[in-house]
């Protein structure tokens, strides 16, 4: 039984996920992607496992979870800055990491893209939200999810109660661009929450003053 079969038996996928033109996606990214990921993305579509692990997907409804959007490059740049400044120790070279997911706690999932020309050999690593700790899984993304959601592995950077409500998948709702954006949140607490969550997703946000409009928009769409 394959890892995808294990996963779909454990977590039934939605009925009609959107199709993806993988040739176009790989041409846009300039690299081949692991076959297991493409099969996984075609089976489930964009969404979240246990309302916690959100994989990046070419049809991600916002730039925060779009595989072809700015987040993978933005996060790699932040890691390079951290390494150059000695901010956090990291077990992998930033140039070898490609972000492929995020959790609601601000952890990021990365492919370790070595060897670059053999994407089916890429392993998975996850960082702690503040960057201090890392967990590396010796296998592909689908195998990691199947092991995680079956309870066979539990990264120490993930919360203990992850499987408290069982294993399930929630598809993303498409963003309705005809709907006017929600009013910008006001109040110190709301803005501090936005700043904290934005930084955990790789945005550069000032400690004080105006929060950039694209950051607020991304927050509103995510909500």
Image (cartoon, grey):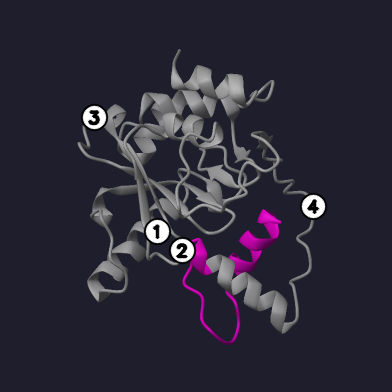
At 67% from the left and 40% from the top, the residue drawn is 172
Residue ID for mark 1: 75
Q: Residue at x 34, y 32 (%)?
A: 139
Q: Is residue 105 magenta?
A: no
Residue that mark 2 sits on: 202
Disc 1, SS:
helix
Looking at the image, can residue 145 be seen? yes
Which residue corresponds to the image point at 26% horizontal and 67% vertical from the top-left?
Answer: 83
Label 2 and label 3: CA atoms lie apart by 27 Å
**Number of numbered discs overlaid on the protein picture:** 4
Q: Earlier in the sequence, mark 1 or mark 4?
A: 1
Q: Which residue is mark 4?
A: 179
Q: Mark 2 and 1 residues: CB-CB less than 8 Å, in contact?
A: yes
Residue density around tag 3, few if under 14, some if 14–19, many if 20 or more, within 10 Å: few
Q: In the rendered structure, does residue 210 fall within the stretch colored magenta?
A: yes
Secondary structure category for the residue under label 4: loop
Q: Is residue 17 above or below residue 47?
A: above
Contact, mark 4 vs mark 2 (Cβ under 8 Å): no
Pick the front one: 185 or 154:
154
* In front: label 4 or label 2: 2
- Mark 2 / mark 3, whichever is N-terminal: 3
Left or right placement of residue 55 versus residue 74 in this view: right
Element on which disc 3 rests? loop
């Amino acid at each position: 039984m394959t890892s995808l079969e294990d996963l779909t038996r454990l977590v039934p996928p939605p009925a009609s996920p959107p199709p993806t033109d993988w040739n176009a996606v790989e041409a846009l990214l300039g690299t081949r992607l692991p076959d297991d990921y493409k099969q996984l993305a075609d089976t489930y579509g964009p969404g979240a496992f246990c309302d916690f692990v959100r994989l990046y997907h070419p049809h991600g409804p916002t730039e925060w979870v779009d595989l072809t959007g700015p987040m993978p490059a933005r996060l790699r740049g932040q890691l390079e800055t951290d390494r150059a400044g000695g901010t956090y120790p990291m077990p992998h070279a930033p140039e070898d990491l490609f972000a492929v997911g995020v959790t609601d706690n601000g952890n990021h999932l990365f492919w370790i893209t070595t060897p670059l020309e053999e994407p089916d050999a890429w392993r998975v690593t996850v960082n702690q939200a503040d960057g201090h700790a890392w967990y590396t899984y010796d296998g592909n993304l689908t195998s990691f999810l199947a092991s995680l959601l079956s309870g066979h592995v539990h990264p120490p950077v993930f919360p203990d109660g992850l499987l408290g409500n069982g294993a399930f998948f929630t598809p993303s709702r498409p963003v309705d661009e005809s709907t006017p954006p929600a009013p910008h949140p006001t109040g110190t607490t709301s803005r501090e929450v936005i700043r904290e969550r934005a930084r955990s997703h790789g945005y550069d946000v000032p400690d004080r003053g105006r929060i950039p409009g694209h950051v607020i928009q991304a927050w509103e769409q995510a909500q």
